[in-house]
Every structure is written in C-alpha cells, then in structure tokens.
Image (cartoon, helix red, strand yellow):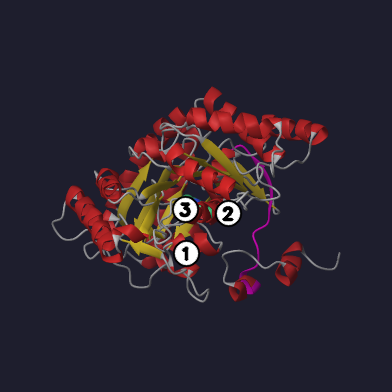
Amino acid sequence: NFDKTPEERDIAHHFHAYTDARRHEEVGPMIIESGQGIYVKDNNGKRFIEGMAGLWSVAVGFQEQRLIDVVVKQMRQLPYYHNFGHKTHGPAIELAEQLIKLAHVPMSKVFYTNSGSEANDTVLKMVWYRSNALGKPEKKKVIARNRAYHGVTIAAASLTGLPNNHRSFDLPLNGVLHTLAPHYWKEGQNGETEEQFATRCADELDALIQREGPDTVAAFWAEPVMGAGGVVVPPATYFEKIQAVLAKYDVLFVADEVICGFGRTGEMFGSITYDIRPDVMVMSKQITSSYVPFSAIMMNDRFYQPIADESHRISTFGHGFTGGGHPLGAIVALENLAIIKERDLVANAKETGTHFLNRLHTLSESPLVGEVRGVGLIAALELVDDKAAKSVKVAGKLGRLMNETMQRNGLISRGMGDAVAFCPPLIITRAQADDMFEIVARSLREVEAEVGV
Ligand code: PLP
C-alpha cells in the first residue's frame, strides 16, 4: 500500500473509538509514533507534552525501561497463563498480595479483569450473585451518578451517567439508576454553601433509595474524583454524608479508582483523599501505566464471603476472562507499583499537582474561565462566555477551540464539553509543569483573541 499515506489508510479502514466517524473522514487522524517521559511525537516529528498521560493512565511516563525489561523477561519465562479453576502463576499471586497490602481499609480478595469497563461489569454481576446468595433476589438495583464514567460495556455503560453512552444504544439497563452529580459549580444553587450542597446530594440519594425501596437497592458506585464527567472534585463533606445514607440502608460502596488509583489525587487512592471506606475497589489504567491492558477488583470479606458460599453451593463461580490476571499485566503492575513507591510519585502528584493547580488558578481572571478545579495531578479549566451566568452560547465550542489551540501549541489535553482536563504522567517535574502551564496560558490568550473578549 505504498501509494497511500498512513492518514488515508487510517481513514479507509480504522473505525475510531469515541469519534464522529464522518468528521474523522474529513479531519483525518493524528498519528503518534513514539513516546519518551511525558512527551509523545507524531509522524511529522512534532513533539507534544502528553497532558492527559494518554487516557489518564501512563503514570510512569513513556519508554520506562524497567517495564520493558520485566515484560521481555516474563515473555521468555511464561508469556501466558490463566486463573480458571485452581490454576494460577507467580505474578498473579504476588500482585493480589501487594494490592491488599496497599489498601487503606481491610480487604480480602482480588479478582482480575482486562479493562475498567470489564471490571465494573464484573462487579455488577458479583453484586447480583451476592444478593441471590444472601436470599435477597429483590435487592439488585444499583445507583451511580449523573456525569459518572464507569466504562462502555453493557453494565458499565449503564452505570456511566453521560448521555453519549446511552443515546442510540438502548441503555441504561433496568435497575441501574442515577442521582445528582456532586458538581458544585454547575449544580449548586444561589447562596448554597458547598456543605449545604453536599447535604442536598445526600438527601437526594436518600429520597431515591426510599422511592425505590431500601430492600431493592444493593450498591452505590462512585469515582472519588469524576474524570470523564469533567474532573468533578467532590464538595466538602460530600462522601461523609453519602456514606451515612448508604450505611442506613445496607447499601454497598463500590469505589471506581480507575483514574484516581495509584497516586493521581496525591494519595495512593482517591478513597484515601476523601475518606471513603469502600467494600469494593475497581482499579485499572495507572495500575500498569497502561503499558498492558489490565484491571483488578479488590473486595472486602463482607462482599466476598456470600459469593464464595454461593459458588460452592452451585459448584462454580461462572465468570472469568481468558486474559484475567495475565502474567504480562501482573508483572508490569508489580514493577510499576515498585517505581511509584521508589520514586515517591504519590508525593510528587501532591506537590507538583498543587504547584500546577496554583498556577492554573491565576487564570481565573480571564473572562473565559468559569472555574478552575482539581486535586493532586488532575485538574480542569471550565470555560464560559458569560461568567456571571456560568453559561456558554454554543455548548462544547470553547472547550474544543481551547483544546485544538493547546494541541497546536504542543500540549495534548482533553476537551469534555467546555471543560479542558489535565492529567499528566505522575513523573512530571515542576519545570515541566511550568512548561505545560505556559502553553495553557498562551493558548487561553489566543482563544480570548479569537473569540474577541
Ligand atoms: N472507570 C473510570 C473511572 C474510567 O475513567 C474509565 C475509563 O476512562 C473506565 C472505568 C473504563 O475503563 P476502560 O476504558 O479500560 O474500559
């Protein structure tokens, strides 16, 4: 195929994820050829700061030699094995042990899956299985939040609270419900404090459980910080109040740590940052720095024991994946976690993240910036064209313009409606964070000039 450019070949045969497929035929692909540290290079040799760490995931940066080395070694020794029945392998055993040790609350077991979506799907199946095991087959509804992102498989997409993941897919599934997003800037009412708003969120959850019947609601799902929903940092006292409601009705807490886990918020888990005591934790992305697709579900005894009993009663837990606990993923996760610990990347997320966030806050003066929010090394700028009314004339336009401008200036970020997100590799240095900020600030000035404010 030497008569065609890679761009033409991509348009011809590659159906992209999360794309307006017709628009892709017009604008064509961005082809990334290599990565090094916090940078990636495209096929024209242009270098970018990967301000999103890929998809919120490349914690230790690109081309980390230690991860390359363990993969090669594991490939030679045992490139593949599974954990069906009673079989297993060293890396899967070691990683389960390590994850349980890392947990801030008593955890008991780890189940392996391949992606964040699959992990959330699996947890929902486990919730149903457990309710049957407990002789409470009616207690199977689950509650997630508007703006939540839990993935795209059928159950995970149902849990997700974004219209794009439901529209035209005939989702959500029955029994998957949504409650108010803890988005103070967007949902907070005039004069309402953060604490009052948090109380309102908890009251809405309480009312929803009451309406549905407490005996029918099994679990609540939450990302400690919402990622794809716009980097939504919970308002003060939110999780404390939510957990009080869940305790009242014997509802499980599933913490989706797929983005927050392993240092992103400046603690090992987002659940630590916000004092969440989950029954189940869902982990992916930064667990392997996404060098290998991998995910894991960690659960406490209260969650696990009824499932174990049921699997014994009916002779098997009929669920598992060919690639679950893959030795390459497990060995990369172990080395990746060792690097995070040795290089103190969790502390770096806190320090460098705070520095970057402080600098972002200086942009609040801009007529286009409605809100700056973030924690650790995850942040967002919310753009508006009417600051007082917190509104935009054409939804998504400012976010897209800002995103395209930053990309032209050498920074990959992510536009989500009119918010633009930043989530760089955890290895980013203060000087690199300053470089990143300079591009953000310059791009904002260019966008201001372009829209004429
Ligand atoms: N959960 C959260 C919080 C996520 O951010 C994502 C992906 O962005 C997922 C789940 C789904 O993960 P995956 O894309 O690996 O299926």
Residue 288 seen in the figure: yes
**Residue tagged by mark 1?**
158
Q: Is 416 situated left or right of 283 in this image?
A: left
- Between label 3 and label 1, give the one nearer the viewer: 3
Task: Compare marks 1 and 2 and give the one earlier in the sequence.
Answer: 2
**Residue tagged by mark 2?**
118
Residue 27 is one of the magenta-drawn residues: yes
User: Which labelled disc corresponds to residue 184?
Assistant: none
Picture coordinates of residue 381 (x, y %)?
Answer: 37, 53
- Between label 3 and label 2, give the one nearer the viewer: 3
User: From the Cβ of disc 2, is ligand 1 less than 8 Å away?
Assistant: yes
Highlighted range, magenta:
25-37
Task: Compare marks 3 and 2 and give the one earlier in the sequence.
Answer: 2
- Real-space Cα separation, disc 3 to disc 1, in angstroms: 15 Å
The N terminus: image quadrant = bottom right
Q: Is 81 situated left or right of 55 in this image?
A: right
Q: Residues within 10 Å of mark 3 (few under 14, many from 20)?
A: many
Picture coordinates of residue 379 (x, y %)?
Answer: 40, 46
**Residue tagged by mark 3?**
127
User: From the Cβ of disc 3, is ligand 1 less than 8 Å away?
Assistant: no
Residue beneath the point at 24% across and 44% down: 237
Q: Residues within 10 Å of mark 2 (few under 14, many from 20)?
A: many
Compared to residue 428, the image places residue 233 above or below, namely below
Picture coordinates of residue 184 (x, y %)?
Answer: 26, 54
Task: Compare marks 3 and 1 and give the one earlier in the sequence.
Answer: 3
